[in-house]
Amino acid sequence: MLLINHDKSFHLLYVLIVLLLLMKLAPGFISGVKGATFGCIERERQALLKFKDGLIDDSGLLSTWGSEEEKRDCCKWRGVGCNNRTGHVTHLDLSGPTDWLPRLTGKISNSLVELQHLSYLNLRGSNFGGSHFPYFIGSLKKLRYLDLSSIGVTGTLSNQLWNLSRLLYLDLSYNQYVNFTSLDFLSNLFSLEYLDLSNNILSQATRWMQIINKFSFLKVLRLSECDLSNSSPPSLSFTNSSKSLAVIDLSENSLASSTFNWLSNFSNSLVDLNLRWATGSINLNQLSCFSSLEHLDLSGNDLSQTIGWLQLLYNLPRLHELRLRSCSLSIIGPTSPSLVNSSESLAVVDFSDNQLTSSIIYWLANFSNNLVDLHLSNNQLQGSIPEAFANMISLGTLDLSSNQLQGSIPDAFTNMTSLRALDLSSNQLQGDLSSFGCMCSLNVLYISKNNLTGELFQLFQDSHGCVENSLEILKLDENQLHGSVPDITRFTSMTELDLSRNQLNGSLPKRFSQRSELVFLYLNDNQLTGSLTDVTMLSSLRELVIANNRLDGNVSESIGSLSQLEKLLVGRNSLQGVMSEAHFSNLSKLTVLDLTGNSIALKFESNWAPSFQLFGIFLSSCNLGPRFPQWLRNQNNFVELHISNTRISYTIPNWFWNLSNSNLEYLDLSHNKMSGILPDFSSKYSNLQSIDLSSNQFEGPLPLFSSNTASTLFLSHNKFSGPASFLCNIGSDTLSVLDLSNNLLTGWIPDCLMNLGLGILNMASNNFSGKIPSSIGSMRNLQTLSLHNNSFVGELPLSLRNCTSLVFLDLSSNKFRGEIPGWIGESMPSLEVLSLQSNGFNGSIPPNLCHLSNILILDLSLNNISGIIPKCLNNLTSMVQETESEYSFANNAVLSQYLSARGGFSAYQNKIRVGWKGREDVYGSTLGLLRIIDFAGNKLKGEIPEEITGLLQLVALNLSGNNLTGEIPQKIGQLKQLESLDLSGNQLSGLIPITMADLSFLAFLDLSNNHLSGRIPSSTQLQSFNASAFTGNLALCGQPLLQKCPGDETNQSPPANDDNRGKEVVADEFMKWFCTAMGIGFSVFFWGVSGALLLKRSWRHAYFRFLDESWDWLYVKVALRKARIQREFQRLREHVLA
């Protein structure tokens, strides 16, 4: 026994000695466990450094990586994790904060293949700029977690990931440039639990269901927006398919509705199912077996064929979140109260964008204790807001926007103490905000686009209570609130306030009482008056928008204290005074400055360099001149520059054209007096979308523009000279507007217009010559063509008939010849203005022009046209009846539509010189009010057709200087709107129609130099014209002509004796003084009474009260008398019938 114990002791002592030796000889062992100084493997450290060399790290993510002594341990680098025992790199996480802000760019080095012990790799959100997919990752066999989502690589995936059999998590989403010919590359990844291939193109992966069935352990599957095949799934065996698949996202694909047959195999495990915009049409009966579902999103699918869809939800007892947005849902029949127990956990419901009525709210009341988020926007809820909401005390978010709710805001909301966000916008609600005073959790309140009325100050007074401390966002825009803006700083937590587009007609508070957390303040599009107040207390403001009001006075220098301000929009007011450096002293974050339409002068020291870099500059109608603003010299980021009508009268300095800014898209220098020669735009500003240099004094040749040049190009009213050959260099389908009018351009229009997609082409008032090129017919979207006042020759090209969208065609004052083509009336149905004035057209007026049903101005004057006036002119519908043009704004202007650079359509206001009322004027903004026919100065013959009197909306008719015969149509008095009539210089005969006396609006009349006869009809209107309007008609008599008609002479009275002559003198003297006294008496009486009424309010009120009462008395008397007569007549009628 003693021997045995001795041996044991010896062995223990031996083991202890060995351990001590190991500790002595290998101190690195212990320190390695605890973290040695050089813990990582040198080979792996060098691999990571080589990987870093290929990257661009603007965010500083890899700032801890390096070869310096203090950075030698790669295990301590950011994003790197090592095995504590071996020192091998096992973890590499370089993911970006979001998918849209990449932290790393550059190239992926294959040096990472050295990290053979890597089990976790996350490069999500980096942008490797078109590099090939990192196929070498397939050799990292120990990977269990791989996230390469949204890394911007290209290539084709086949079997490169075959060796990653240990992989549990794989995310390759948002790699649209990777070619996924199939999903076979996943076939060997049997251990996968999480798979996300969303936002890739998997249209060729027709066997995706079969591949997914191989993953027995899969829990999460995300294949959103993958362009998956819409073919019906084949009959599959699900023996090895996952029994634990809990999350499936197949949203935004085009799947067959039979996809449910495949999904049903996971019915016992499925917890979250997302088929948003996935199948088009779904029958909810197919969901009956998914009893485990907690989250269901079928938004964007057609559920209209599912009758009793509410009852089907009874089969989903665990449902927590239900989203059925845009599903064409409606309720047929009453809602069943038996659904109370259908789900005890339903908390989130989104039924927005359907056709549900208010009855849905009573069904939802069954879940009043559980509901947290409820969205019912854009449905057909009507009437007042139901009191049922009073029981939904758990609601945190309620969206009832875009319905037809009416009445006042109910007090039921006071019980909803958990409510954080409430959206009632786009309804017809009225009343005040008193219901929200005690809602201490309310953070967001939207009541935009309703019918809230009354004083804003009172409305805010009604919203007192703890909501003043909780409310963060309040939107009351587009209501009918008026009054002044109250002190909003008492809402201590408010960050956003929108009161825009109301009827606020008061002023801003003189000062704000306390410092506010307000970040966004919108007061634009009201009628606010007064000055821009002291805003020192609003020190957190980032956006201040008070544009389009009636503010006047000077701008407070307190604006300069808003150090967080990014957008200052106070344009379209009446502000004045001077703004200097003090107004911008601390605005280092300012990006948008809008002072448009004010009378503000910006005066800075010549060496002032602002601390901000503006993105948008809007200073039109301010005073920046006379020199070009020097402070723009250090602005290198602006995309928009609008400084039209700013009194700049010098040349543009060279430094402006040499700015390093290549992002400029919108440039407006119009309506100044800038001069000089413009540079080559094609090499300086390649991104320009809109250029307006009109109404200046620029000279020299037209500048060159790049092939992808602006959408709109306004160069009119300058002194540009030379040819327009630059048109062939543009060649841009995006160019919508080209206005070169009123310059000194010469030469032919080059025959390369087929390269342009113009909607507006204005080349009026230049010195162009030659023929219109046939390529003009390729511009099928052309709505305005103005070639007025040039020297074009020849006939109109037949290709012009292809411009079927023309609204405005002005070819006046040229040298065109030939007959007027009849296809103008057949091919241009939208034409509103046609002017061929002052050319050499001959032949007759084609009857086809009568097809121009939208025509407002038809001017064929000063040509060599012969023949008769067509009798079909009464087919010109717009001259017969009052119509509103498709292209007119309030029927005042003739507008042409064009695609603007900002997207959507904008309007171009057409202008034309019109001769009427004896003079010529340019009309633009009121052009749409005119209805004019002008055939003057031709060789027309025959009679004036009677049909022309059917043009009831005609404002001006000019047929002068022709060879017309016959009589003036007797029904000409029907033209009640006629303001100008010129029939002079013809051979008209007969009497002036007596109906002409009915033309009460007639302001200009010329019937001179005809063969008219008889008496001029008596009327205040006709006798008011000068005699020259009737001269040259030898047989015409009566006022205002001096020639009297037969029978107008009165018999001579016998000479009176002296006594009678004396009596007449006395009588005349008496009448003179009598009339004078009457005039004085009337004036004294009139001004005495009127003055008293104007100066004494009580008299004025009494007088008008007397008038009202007298009128009421008279009205009652007449009404009673009328009723009595009617009763008598009725009684008499009954008696006769009896």
Image: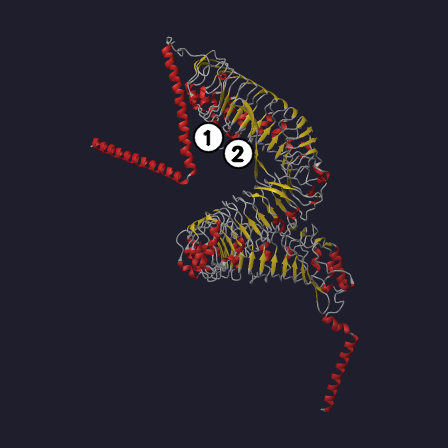
Q: For the residue labelled by badge 1, is the local secondary structure a helix, a strand or a loop?
A: loop
Q: Report the amino acid beneath label 1.
A: Glu
In the foreground, 266 or 819: 819
Q: Say whether disc 1 or disc 2 marks the residue closer to the N-terminus.
A: 1
In the foreground, 1038 or 885: 1038
In the rendered structure, find residue 857 and report the number of the disc placed on it: none
Q: Quadrant of the C terminus?
A: top left
Residue 172 at least partly seen: yes
Q: Quadrant of residue 236?
A: bottom right
Task: Please state if 432 lies on the left or on the right of 222 as rendered.
Answer: left
Q: Quadrant of residue 338?
A: bottom left
Where is 489 relative to 761, above or below?
below
| Residue under pointer 1 | 882
Circle 2 packing at 10 Å, graded few (<14), some (14-19), many (20+), is: some
Q: Quadrant of the N terminus?
A: bottom right
Residue contact between numbered discs 1 and 2, judged by CB atoms under 8 Å: no
Q: Outermost residue toward the bottom?
A: 2
- Image coordinates of residue 1009 in percent, x first then y, are 50, 14
In the rendered structure, find residue 887 and report the number of the disc placed on it: 2
Q: Report the amino acid beneath label 2.
A: Tyr
Number of labelled discs?
2
